[in-house]
Amino acid sequence: MPLAILALAIGAFGIGTTEFVIMGLLPDVADTFDVSIPLAGYLVTGYALGVVLGAPLMTALGTRISRKRMLLLLMGLFIAGNVLSAVAPAFGVMLAGRVVASLAHGAFFGIGAVVAAELVAPQRRAGAIAMMFTGLTVANVVGVPLGTFVGQSFGWRVTFLFVAALGVLGLLGVARLVPDLPKAEGVRLRHELAAFRNVQVLLAMAMTVLGFGGVFAAVTYITPMMTDIAGYADSSVTWLLALLGLGMVGGNLVGGKFADRALMPMLYVSLGSLAVVLALFTVTAHNKVAAAVTLLLIGGLGFATVPPLQKRILDQASGAPTLASAMNIGAFNLGNALSAWLGGLVIAAGLGYTAPNWVGAALAASALVLAVVSSTLERRGAAGSRVVTGAQALTAVPEAEPARR
């Protein structure tokens, strides 16, 4: 893989760290600003909404400049947002800093995926995308625990300065290693928007919302599930989350490898297996060892869907894929928010802490159904094209006969 993809992965590592590290620091931040935990939770919600809104907005604004320059601007925005969070004198200012940082998230991953795919041969594109996303998955294993430790030891403000420093490394890496690839000639915002008239692009995004949403339906409530149901101590949650992150790293790499060989079969296997494992989690959550193994599998199967879904978007929106690619990153976050809300509803209904696993299983199964529908429509379209081509060839024969005489 080109070193440029390593630079993109470093940026992804920083973005992944700032997205999730706030969860471990929320009580400290709430104490600093003398706000309640639910109010401090807006730092998580605000970031997620910023990703969903920022992905199309920032990508649209960047259609007139090169992708490398846009990546540099996004990393600059990310650094500014985290510095603002670190020095915030009031809660509202910190919330603004979180939103500023989040605006870079979707567009960076969306544009970065396009750049990574263009740096390698066509048969290695999913692997290149997976390598960039490795930065995000490793953030859950290394960046988030390390950032939480730094925040608990030296104060949460130091954590956000640390994340800003990661952003500086990512910016320098992009500036030094990512080539300034030429823009596709004649591609404007209207061409990027035209990709959304393709039903396959919309189906892929719906699969993203439902498939990865299935993962977050379970892991959003992993702390009470592991402590109240499985019987783990509160202190065990950190390494359990790291175990989930290890599964994500492995699943991401496996998904990238096999998506280059057989994209749709890879989606069938990962989404179907994810639905089964999430359903089984309602049972295995009652046993410590089984719960830990299941958590590893959920992380692996969940992230095994990421490279093939992102590559599916690039394939179906070829010619003008940047906005669609960025919007698909927003779809991941939309799925996270939707599934967390649905999981909360079933818990509030008195169905218990394992009930969100059934929600996740239903979401993943729905994504599998959409994958089958997408593949079926694609085959019918290809068959129709062959029929039309054959008919045109037959029609052309009589016209050619007089010329031979």
Image (cartoon, helix red, strand yellow):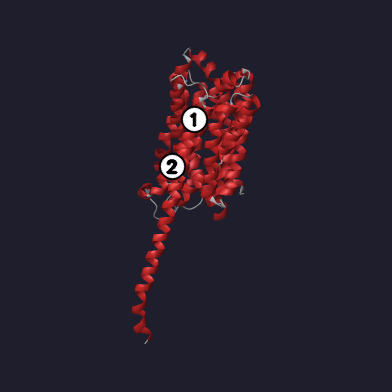
- Residue 87, percent from left and from top: 51, 21
- Residue 35, percent from left and from top: 46, 13
Q: How many numbered circles are shown?
A: 2
Q: Nearer the viewer, mark 2 or mark 1?
A: 1
Tell me: residue 395, above or below residue 230. Answer: below
Residue 170 in sight from this viewpoint: no
Residue 182 lies left or right of residue 141; in this view the side is left
- Measured in 3D between alpha carbons, the distance from the residue under mark 2 to the one under mark 1, in whole angstroms, is 22 Å
Q: Dot 2 corresponds to which residue? A: 205
Mark number displayed over residue 358: 1
Of the numbered discs 2 and 1, the one sitting upstream in the chain is 2
Q: Residue at x 50, y 31 (%)?
A: 216
Q: Amino acid at mark 2?
A: Met
Q: Amino acid at mark 1?
A: Trp
- Residue 194, percent from left and from top: 36, 49
Residue 286 in sight from this viewpoint: yes
Q: Which residue reaches farthest right?
A: 289
